[in-house]
Amino acid sequence: MKILLTGFEPFGGESINPSWEAVRLVRNVPEGMDIVRLRLPVTFAGARESLRAAAREHRPDVILSVGQAGGREGISLERIAVNLMDARIPDNAGFQPVDEPLYADGPAAYFSSLPLRPLLAALQEAEIPASISNTAGLYVCNAVFYEAARLKAQGKVRLAGFIHVPYLPGQAAEKDAPSLPLDRMVRALEIVFENLGRKG
Ligand code: PCA
């Protein structure tokens, strides 16, 4: 089974993005899983295009994308990708869309095709703070999630999902924000891979 696993470059004044740090450190995956890692830019156009190009090139069975959601407490298993861009801050290319659809002809939203409940149970079993989230925001992460879900809807991949991770302790220190150590994030991703075959 081939997995396209994506993380993001830093944005919003940060010098690190925990999503990419976790993605690059994932090691212990089930036998037969082949992981292709991709670091996406935090730009609406660039991230969407890179994801589509990587899907064309590698033909993955599964697309799992990971992003930073500063301020959140634990791992967020995202449930819904919305057909809208509404940016509170400009992306890394200076683009700041307000209330623009991703696809004029696309459905309002797609659901994650990951087995969210079993994944949540497995994360809780491992004592990793986690929850199912009903919004991935309307920024670049949501746009990437929508692209992946669209590929799934078109039958080009079997599963498409998105996970947000909190700040790392070093990022959170000055902000009085919650955080999660990197090794817990890496383990969370490994647990997701171990449980991908479960029925949601
Ligand atoms: N988080 C942003 C974009 C990149 C990232 O890591 C988001 O939640 O949209």
Image: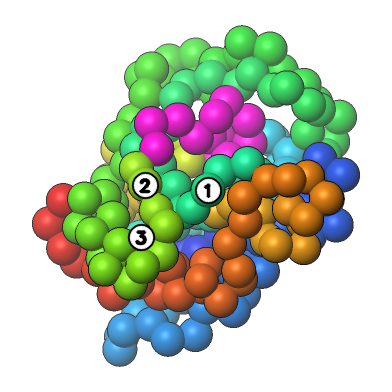
Mark 1 or 3: in front is 1
Per the model, the C-alpha gap separating discs 1 and 3 is 26 Å
Res 52 seen here: no
Q: Residue at x 49, y 52 (%)?
A: 74
Q: Position of residue 108 (x, y in %)?
A: 38, 17
Mark 1 closeness class: few <14, some 14–19, many ≥20 residues within 10 Å: some
Q: Is residue 140 magenta?
A: yes
Pointer 2 with pointer 1, Cβ within 8 A? yes
Q: Earlier in the sequence, mark 2 or mark 1?
A: 1
- The residue pinned by badge 2 equals 131
User: Could you say where residue 109 lies in the image, as x and y percent from the top left?
Assistant: 37, 24
Residue matched to label 1: 73
Disc 3 designates what residue? Answer: 62
Q: Amino acid at mark 1?
A: Glu
Residue at left offset 40%, top offset 74% = 190
Q: Position of residue 102 (x, y in %)?
A: 55, 23
Q: Which residues are magenta?
A: 133-144
Q: Residues within 10 Å of mark 3 (few under 14, many from 20)?
A: many
Q: Nearer the viewer, residue 103 or 80?
A: 80
Q: Quadrant of the N terminus?
A: bottom left
- Who comes first in sequence, dot 1 or dot 3? 3
Q: Residue at x 44, y 47 (%)?
A: 76
Q: Vertically, is 80 above or below 96?
A: below
Disc 1 to disc 3: CB gap under 8 Å: no
Q: Residue at x 34, y 43 (%)?
A: 132
Q: How many numbered discs?
A: 3
